[in-house]
Image (cartoon, rainbow, N blue to C red):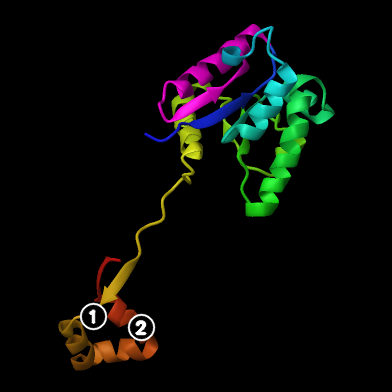
Amino acid sequence: MNNPKSIFISYSWDSDEHRLWVKQLADLIEENPEYHVIWDGYDLDNLIDKNLYMEKSVIDADYMVIVATKKYQEKSNARTGGDGIETSIADSQYWEQMQNGGKSKIFSILREKDAIPTYLKNQLHINFTDESNFEIKFNDLLNVFKDNTLFKRPAKKKIILTMSIISVYTANAQYHQKAEQNPFSLVYDGAITENV
């Protein structure tokens, strides 16, 4: 198996209840062998340089998930506290990634309404405000890590013209009349398609 993708979870310490919610999210992601979660609840202790930890987490992670709450938004926009430090680093990374490929590894999951940090407001997010949809939204989150879109494009098909279709086209006057109005609709209407 390949190395697991690293997922850095950035959040604010709003309350014990919120920290527990983030822990449960981290646990669910970490249980999947495809991912390794970078989260202060697992990694930080009194002996670690927390500023270096935040810097390396933002820069080195394959994805940075921001758990957006009003408190996080306030600290992020004002560049205060740990959330502000992470935002300062993430902001420059975000714009560099957008300029170089139009995609960024940094995105938000919405825990409270209207709580997205300013620098990420033009980006789509996953809405976790309704607990009854948690499982659906969690699967959406995993799809982000897999670089999946909401829907897969259908497979391309090629048109195969058969002799019977061409014979009907040339022999039937009704079809000739239809062909004069739209010469391509008849052939396509009777065509056989197969996957490319």
Count of picture labels: 2
Q: Compare marks 2 and 1 and give the one earlier in the sequence.
A: 1
Which residue is pictured at 70% across the width and 18% down the height?
12
- Figure quadrant of the C terminus: bottom left
Residue 69 visible somewhere in the drawing? no
Which residue is pictured at 46% across the width and 40% down the height?
146
Is 178 left or right of 21, judged from the image as shown?
left
Answer above or below: position of 196 versus 25: below
Say which of 159 and 27 sits in front. Answer: 27
Is 104 left or right of 121, judged from the image as shown?
left
Residue located beneath label 2 in the image? 184
Tell me residue 150's x, y (percent).
47, 45
Residue 52 within the magenta-colored segment of the rendering: no
Tell me residue 116's x, y (percent).
70, 32
The stretch in magenta equals 15-40
Answer above or below: position of 193 versus 174: above
- Figure quadrant of the N terminus: top left
User: Residue 161: which numbered mark, if any?
Assistant: 1
Say which of 81 and 170 sits in front. Answer: 81
Say which of 135 and 61 sits in front. Answer: 61
Tell me residue 72's x, y (percent).
73, 23
Tell me residue 124's x, y (percent).
61, 41
Q: Amino acid at mark 2?
A: Phe
